[in-house]
Amino acid sequence: MSLTRLKYFVVVAEELSFTRASARLHISQPPLTQQIRTLEREVNQELFKRSSRRISLTPAGEALLPEARRILERYQRLPGLLHEAATESTRTLTVGCVASAVIGLVPQILCELGRANPRVAVRIQEAGVETQMDRLRSGDLDAGLLRVRELGEEWFWVDAAPEYYCAAVPISHPLARRGVVQWRELADEVLVIADRSRASLEFDTVIAACSKNGFTPIVVAEAISGYNIIPLIAGNRGIGIVPERVSAFKMDGVAYCPLSPRIATVPMRLVVRKNKIDASINRLGELVRTASVPLCRSEV
């Protein structure tokens, strides 16, 4: 199956006329018809319904059309990607990140990127979600690591591995020795979670998780981010609800316990404007997608 035949197929499918398609492709109609018939033999499917008056796509043709467009689009991008890979000089990617990415995710990415391509340096700027989105729009950031659900068509994103909430518990608290903590066991505890003004989605997700498990939490929202919660827990201010990646931050006086039932956090995503995608961004995205999540467990 040649790319030329796929191109011819797409044009005929768009025009639904061999006459108009041949004019658009600047070839005569008989060779075009022959190429389409060859393609049909290759896929062992009829792609067009033909009559004396009109042609239309068969179900097989309708299925092939979007795939053919994607293949041709990727082919057109190949020269640019190869040029970038061959000529890429030392560059610096400016990447924003929410605080909960600083501990577990960013070190993994920097380590792997340094091994994969030492010519690409990364400058990390910690910032909240709204600030990152503003800086991505203005071009001050090349990419952002943030927790967000809905994004518009102008954005490209890669999800990191799913993670779940766990409890950060003062080591002197009885729950620290439980191994796994039930959400409902937190009903009478003072909870410390990220402040809603800085992390509204995380705040709302935790509150909804408590409600789903039958209680309205007693909340002291004093921390601006996940890992800033941990010193408060060490100071016996309450029990923290944090993403699993935060459990990579070890501090004396704090134990991390999985929560049951498991409730997923707002997804951590690498977000990039589509016009910013290049070979370095693609590599960064692959590293984010494959980064591991630390095992949350009590070490009491």
Image: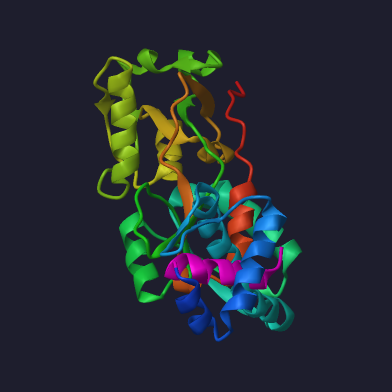
Figure check: 143 above or below 150: below
State whether the magenta stretch is mostly helix, strand or loop.
Answer: helix
Q: Which residues are magenta?
A: 1-16
Residue sitting nearer the eye, 1 or 95: 1
Quick check: is 71 in the magenta stretch?
Answer: no
Image location (x, y in percent) of residue 29: 57, 78
For residue 131, what is the image quadrant? bottom left
Figure check: 291 above or below 187: below
Figure check: 194 above or below 71: above
Q: Is residue 292 left or right of residue 183?
A: right
Residue sitting nearer the eye, 56 or 169: 56
Q: Is residue 207 left or right of residue 280?
A: left
Image location (x, y in percent) of residue 146: 43, 53
Quick check: is 4 in the magenta stretch?
Answer: yes
Q: Residue lying furthest bottom in this view?
A: 26
Figure check: 299 above or below 110: above
What residue is rendered at 31% in x and 23% in y?
210
Residue sitting nearer the eye, 15 or 147: 15
Q: Is residue 125 left or right of residue 60?
A: left
Residue sitting nearer the eye, 28 or 259: 28
Mark yes or no: residue 122 visible: no
Image location (x, y in percent) of residue 255: 53, 26
Mark yes or no: residue 66 visible: yes
Quarter holding the N terminus is bottom right
Q: Is residue 134 left or right of residue 2?
A: left
